[in-house]
């Protein structure tokens, strides 16, 4: 395994990686193995999962994809696994191993696509330096919506959230508030703090002041509290955005929010 493995890598994770590398080296179709996530930032603990990318020779990629479950089963006592279509990544196999319980993400990537990535991975093992060379073809770019993309949508979303609260669809409203944190507030705040804008992942540790602010956006199953949390989302967004001029959409959405608060007997 890579001698520069992180200091915080727990021993069960380290042992699993040793076995995984020894197994995959014997498959000539596998060209290399990389690690991402908290492995890269040396911020792992006993609760961390392993985010691994398995580079596959392009000529054998289709066959390896068909055998992913069987390959995963060779790496340890596999309890369950499913593919990652729900997160827009069908190349991903999400696995749960036993003894001890360990969450491992295995993303199988063809060598022709290895330059397209969201982070610069740590190469744990490779054949003849081929993975390192392939990575040089591109630069990691983590996806983040442009500020204008968010501004175009935010006030429509605020109106939508207010309608759900006014109608009494509070489960829907609570889910909506969570989506605003994950899609807008968390990523914008993390980017401002110089961090990777990955939702609200580890925000309590990476940006504690922002995490404290976001507590205000968490609502209980109560219309008045959902309205309070929605207004907190607006306040935080206004602090984070670069737009200074109030748009017609913003003005209308906030007037609607005021009206819903008045209907519910809430004073802002």
Image: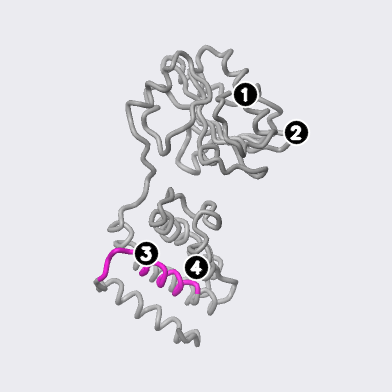
Give me the disc on residue 213: 4
Q: Quadrant of residue 4?
A: top right
Sequence order check: which comes first, mark 1 or mark 3? Answer: 1
- For label 2, the crowd category at 10 Å Cα-Cα, with few meaning under 14, some 14 to 19 and many 20 or more, is few
Circle 2 residue: 99
| Magenta span of residues | 229-244
Task: Quote the CA–CA distance across marks 1 and 2.
Answer: 15 Å
Mark 1 or mark 2, which has the lower sequence index? 1
Relative to 52, is 244 on the left or the right?
A: left
Evaluate whether residue 82 shows in this view: no
Depth check, mark 3 against mark 2: the one in front is 3
Q: CA distance from mark 4 to mark 2?
A: 39 Å
Q: Kindly tell me whether residue 35 is visible in this rendering.
A: yes
Q: Nearer the viewer, residue 8 or 106?
A: 8
Residue drawn 71% across the image and 38% down it:
101
Say which residue label 3 marks: 240
């Amino acid at each position: 395994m890579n001698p520069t493995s992180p200091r915080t890598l727990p021993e069960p994770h380290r042992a699993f990686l040793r076995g995984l590398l020894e197994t995959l080296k014997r498959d000539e179709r596998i060209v290399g193995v990389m690690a991402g996530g908290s492995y890269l930032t040396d911020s792992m603990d006993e609760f961390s999962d392993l985010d691994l990318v398995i580079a596959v020779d392009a000529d054998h990629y289709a066959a390896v994809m068909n055998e992913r479950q069987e390959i995963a089963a060779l790496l340890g006592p596999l309890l369950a696994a499913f593919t990652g279509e729900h997160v827009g990544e069908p190349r991903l196999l999400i696995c749960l191993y036993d003894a001890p319980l360990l969450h491992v993400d295995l993303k199988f990537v063809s060598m022709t696509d290895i330059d397209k990535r969201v982070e610069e991975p740590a190469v744990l093992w490779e054949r003849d330096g081929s993975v390192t060379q392939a990575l040089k073809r591109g630069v990691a770019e983590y996806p983040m919506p442009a500020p204008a993309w968010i501004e175009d949508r935010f006030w429509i979303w605020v109106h939508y959230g207010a309608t759900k609260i006014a109608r009494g669809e509070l489960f829907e409203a609570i889910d909506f508030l969570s989506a605003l944190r994950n899609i807008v507030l968390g990523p914008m705040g993390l980017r401002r703090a110089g961090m990777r804008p990955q939702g609200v992942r580890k925000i309590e540790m990476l940006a504690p002041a922002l995490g404290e602010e976001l507590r205000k956006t968490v609502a209980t199953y109560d219309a008045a509290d959902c309205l309070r949390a929605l207004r907190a989302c607006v306040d935080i967004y206004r602090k984070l955005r670069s737009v200074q001029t109030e748009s017609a959409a913003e003005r209308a959405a906030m007037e609607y929010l005021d009206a819903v608060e008045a209907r519910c007997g809430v004073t802002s």
